Image (cartoon, grey):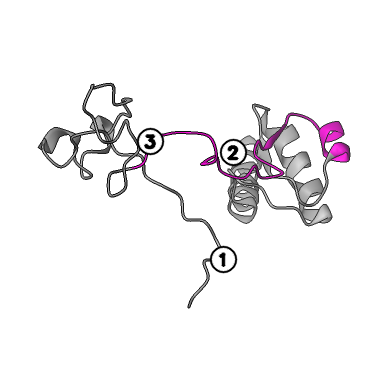
Amino acid sequence: MLEKKYKMTTKFLRRDWKRHSKLGRKRKKKQVWRKPKGRDNKMREKRRGYPIIVSVGYKKRKTEDKKPITIKNIKDLDKINKNKKIIIGKTGKKKKIEIIKKIKEMKLKINNFNIDKFLNQSKKKLGEKKNESK
């Protein structure tokens, strides 16, 4: 026999999801969980062969780094480990360039940013501004 190594994530289906097309699997926005409350409801009684009900024990495991850290200045980089997720916050272009260079030295990855693309674009724009001023 094969043993299950990982517990699959369970889909909690609404009571009559097979009967009504609005509640079906294809329409995810309409798949809102409602607790079955009917007197003769087999799902409420937790009978075998019927969809499962939301209850204790189906919670997913917590991951260590759920929330990414926003960086707004260079001092924020000192607090970061290599395992943490990084997002660059609202900063000006000059500070952004400094922050990105420091991140590149530390060999960290940014979630919402392409480092090489940004540095190339900023170099081109700075070069164009210098040519215009001359």
Gap between marks 1 and 2 measured at Cα = 64 Å
Task: Decide which of tag 1 and tag 3 comes sooner along the chain.
Answer: 1
- Amino acid at circle 2: Glu
Task: Decide which of tag 2 and tag 3 comes sooner along the chain.
Answer: 3
Q: Which residues are magenta?
A: 52-79
Give the residue drawn at x 20%, y 45%.
Answer: 26
**Where is residue 121 drawn, in percent x and y?**
58, 48
**Where is residue 46 drawn, in percent x and y?**
35, 38
State yes or no: discs 1 and 2 in contact (Cβ < 8 Å).
no
- Amino acid at circle 1: Lys
Residue that protrudes farthest toward the bottom in the picture: 1
Give the residue drawn at x 32%, y 47%.
Answer: 48
- Pick whichever, 16 or 100, lies toward us: 16
SS under mark 2: helix
Report the residue marked by disc 3.
53
Task: Decide which of tag 1 and tag 2 comes sooner along the chain.
Answer: 1
**Where is residue 96 drawn, in percent x and y?**
71, 36
Please give left or right for residue 81 compared with residue 14 in the image: right
Report the residue marked by disc 1.
5
- Pick whichever, 115 or 7, lies toward us: 7
